[in-house]
Image: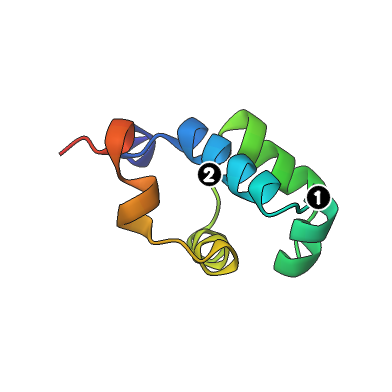
Amino acid sequence: NKANNLFDFSSFGRKIKTLRMDQGLSRKQLSSKLEISERHIARIENEGRRPSLELFFALIIVFDVSVDGYFLSGENNKS
């Protein structure tokens, strides 16, 4: 899949988990905010599951981070 080659979803999942934990949120609390299952959050965090575009932006909003500043910096920036 071309999208998987352009973006490291495993790293994205680890960053989501770090943000969630840094904010003291359980998976249950985050899933409630996003109106998705806890299992879906777990799959994103631990299995590198690719979120929908809508969920991707919801996560950005919930955690109040910028896409380029947080998710595309360092190891993820392949340009």
Q: Is residue 20 left or right of residue 7?
A: right
Instruction: Identify the mark at residue 65; answer none if there is no mark.
Output: none
Question: Residue at position x 68%, y 38% from top?
Answer: 43
Quarter of the image where one finds residue 17: top right
Residue 44 position in % (x across, y down): 62, 41
Q: Nearer the viewer, residue 64 or 27?
A: 64
Q: Nearer the viewer, residue 71 or 21?
A: 21
Q: SS class of the residue under badge 2?
A: loop
Question: Residue at position x 56%, y 39% from top?
Answer: 13
Q: How many marks?
A: 2
Mark 2 burial class by Cα count in 10 Å: few <14, some 14-19, many 20+: some
Q: SS class of the residue under badge 1?
A: loop
Where is the N terminus found, in terms of image quarters?
top left
Residue 29 position in % (x across, y down): 81, 59
Q: Residue under circle 2? A: 50
Residue 73 position in % (x across, y down): 30, 43
Q: Is residue 37 left or right of residue 65?
A: right
Mark 1 burial class by Cα count in 10 Å: few <14, some 14-19, many 20+: few
Q: Residue under circle 1? A: 26
**Do callouts 2 and 1 mark residues in contact (Cβ within 8 Å)?**
no
In the image, what residue type sits under mark 1? Ser
Q: Earlier in the sequence, mark 2 or mark 1?
A: 1
Residue 16 position in % (x across, y down): 58, 46
As drawn, 78 above or below 40: above
Question: Residue at position x 53%, y 41% from top?
Answer: 15
**Nearest-to-viewer mark from 2 and 1:** 1
Quarter of the image where one finds residue 28: bottom right
In the image, what residue type sits under mark 2? Arg
Tell which residue pokes out farthest to the left in this image. Answer: 79
Q: Give how far apart the Cα atoms at labels 2 and 1 are.
A: 20 Å
Tell which residue pokes out farthest to the right in this image. Answer: 28
